Amino acid sequence: MKQFLHLLISLIIISGLTACQDAVFDSEGDCSSTYRLHLSYTRNLQWADAFPAEVTNVGVYAFNTDGSLAWAGSQSADRLHDNGNCIDLPLDPGTYDIIVWCGGKSLESAAHSWTLDGGENIATKAHLNCRLATTVANDGSRIADSDIHRLYHGSIDRAVMPDEPGTHNYDIDLTKDTNFIRVVLQHADGEPVNPQWFTFAITDTNGALDHTNSTSEAVPVTYRPWAITTAETELPDPDNVATGSRATTQISSVIADMTTSRLVKGNRPTIEIQCTEPGNEHLVARLDLISYFLMIKGSANRHIEDQDFLDRQDDYTMMLILDNNNRWNLKLGLYINSWRIVKQDAVLQ
């Protein structure tokens, strides 16, 4: 009886293996191994997946444990949306490092794009160094003075692709590597600010990012505004609010729009605002962006690591109030995303 049971079990196992092989051969079974990579972008302060709304194209690179390229593929985000934001990985069972670079929606006039050091001949991770295309000035400095194409990064180290039937899913949550920074200048008395009398520049060493999404070279890049505009706002006159008067005060502003690469804690990006008014040339402010931006984390985000906050907060508005001599009125401080900050020791005039 025992020999009969052993024979029966053996027949069942052999039958199962044969059926699985037939199913694979006929493409009708589920005995093959399928690997699917799901992409998302929830690393923002809304804590919601913005991948469908922001990302436009995807490049995926899988490397063997010896560092050689095993597979590379690209796809439009629209096609991924139709597939649940997933892309199939046609890999053999094994262990791989997976690296993703994605592009996103930018202004049509965005002139500064990103290139990989390896171009179309990626062979090693070093070829995935992502470099911002900049303009070289006469003095050799690198300038980015237009909008920058949006960039996203993600990776998985040592992803194991098992030799087991079924679909195996892997997830990458992207990091956004571009920041929109808007600087607003206003006069305390509401008088117009002359946009021709001010220059704006952000300097940082973040023009190249390696496959780990770290800055990979110390060459400074100067980011200049790609748009300088003026705007007027009507505010209730504080002297007449108590009486119920509808009188308003006209506030005029100069607005400078800039886009930068990833802000990395440990770097020292600075913003300089210069007044070029004839006979009144002076430095309005020089600010350490990282230290100031981290001041607006607030109690709601105190649990977030500093770098995580810098990656999640990709949109900043800085407002400075000027006196009649076009100097920064330090008593009124600095407003960043509506947070009022007073820190006078970092200001040079």
Image (cartoon, helix red, strand yellow):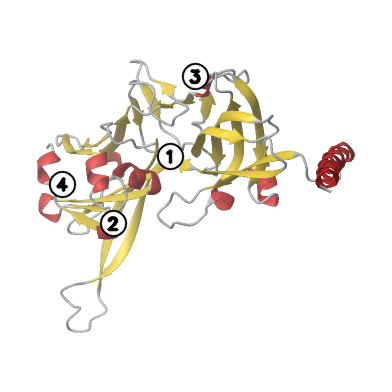
Residue at mark 4 to residue at mark 2: CA–CA distance: 16 Å
Question: The residue under label 4 is which amino acid type?
Answer: Trp
N-terminal label among 1 and 3:
3
N-terminal label among 2 and 1:
1
Asked which secondary structure carries label 4, the reply is: loop
Residue nearer the viewer, 229 or 349: 349
Percent coordinates x, y for residue 219 in the rendering: 34, 20
Residue at mark 2 to residue at mark 3: CA–CA distance: 49 Å
Can residue 256 be seen here? Answer: no
Question: The residue under label 3 is which amino acid type?
Answer: Ala
N-terminal label among 4 and 2:
2
Mark 4 vs mark 3, foreground winner is 3
N-terminal label among 4 and 3:
3
Mark 4 surroundings within 10 Å by alpha-carbon count, few (fewer than 14), some (14 through 19), many (20 or more)? many
The residue sitting at 72% across, 39% down in the picture is 33
Disc 2: which residue: 252
Residue at mark 2 to residue at mark 1: CA–CA distance: 29 Å
